[in-house]
Amino acid sequence: MSDGLLAQLVVALSQRRVRIVDLTQTLSPEFPQIVLPPEMAQAWPFRLEEASRYDERGPGWYWNNFSCSEHTGTHFDAPIHWVSGRDLPNNATDTLPLEDLIGPACVMDCSRQAAADPDFLLTADHIRDWERQYGRIPPRAWFLMRTDWSQRRDPVAYQNLDEAGQHTPGPDTSAVRFLVEERDVVGFGSEAIGTDAGQGAHLKPPYPCHYYMHGNGRHGLQCLTNLDLLPPTGAVIICPPLKIRQGSGSPLRVLALVERSA
């Protein structure tokens, strides 16, 4: 094997100088799905049906059939998912630019604020403060908002619904516009069930992360986990969704590569 860049990566992985971190929730019928107002169409939950298990249905093999929404479990949002991105080129999961699916990750720890206030909103000023400590967000990076929300194992606590709707942290309008317009990020990732805050319908515009990210050809990752295992900068994430024709998104497995310290 040559000593090119890919060969160096293979060697680093084999020598465990690069750690692989799984940022994906396990997809199962118990994992909660997005809940919309009752008058709107709903996302299918994940359903798994055994087809055969080394028995009369198939003596030498085990397999399952499954069904779910494109937006179930840890999942990817493509620009076509939102009305603001519906007319963009290469906006669906089968036409996305491949270079958008592997890139550097900037991870901002908002876990303390989210623990104190489930409706915590990340602002542009918060991000500027983070940059003063960790450096400027590079162009075409993924910005991941760590809240430790994924550590809520109870589906009811994870959804955090009451009569006013869902209460989960997310970015406000200023943060999203700053990331898109001034830092040229490729996408935004969240540990909660959506990239927008649970009360994001009350912001201007409603659901600003969806509106500005997808309207500018950027992407979203939801229901991430293990962000506490990533450094603020230096990780690389790999996040290709299923290649669904005209897909608005899909469940996926998100991996991060992290260089081990010497």
Image (cartoon, rainbow, N blue to C red):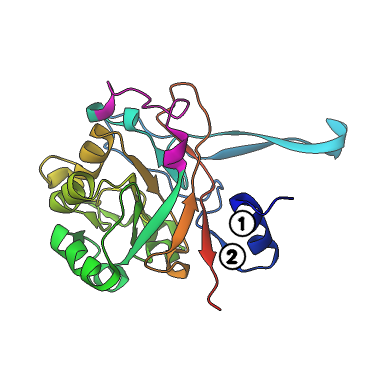
- What amino acid type is highlighted by mark number 2? Val
Name of the residue lying farthest toward the bottom: 262
Quarter assignment of residue 131: bottom left
N-term mark: 1 or 2: 1
Q: Residues within 10 Å of mark 1 (few under 14, many from 20)?
A: some
In this view, the residue in front, 245 or 236, is 236
Q: Is residue 90 magenta?
A: yes
Counting the numbered discs, the total is 2
Tell me: 209 left or right of 17. Answer: left
Rendering coords of residue 65 (x, y %) = 66, 32
| Residue occupying the point 69% across, 36% down | 64
Q: Is residue 19 magenta?
A: no
Tell me: 253 left or right of 95. Answer: right
Does the residue at mark 1 contact the one at mark 2 (Cβ under 8 Å)? Answer: yes
Instruction: Considering the whole magenta stretch, tell me its main secondary structure.
Output: loop
Tell me: 23 left or right of 217. Answer: right
**Of helix, strand and loop, which one carries label 1?**
helix
Quarter assignment of residue 114: bottom left
Mark pair 1, 2: CA separation: 8 Å
> Mark 1 highlights which residue?
9
- Circle number at residue 18: 2
- Quarter of the C terminus within the rendering: bottom right
Q: Nearer the viewer, mark 1 or mark 2?
A: 1
| Residue occupying the point 65% across, 68% down | 16
In this view, the residue in front, 248 or 45, is 248
- What amino acid type is highlighted by mark number 1? Leu
Name of the residue lying farthest toward the front: 3
Rendering coords of residue 215 (x, y %) = 23, 33
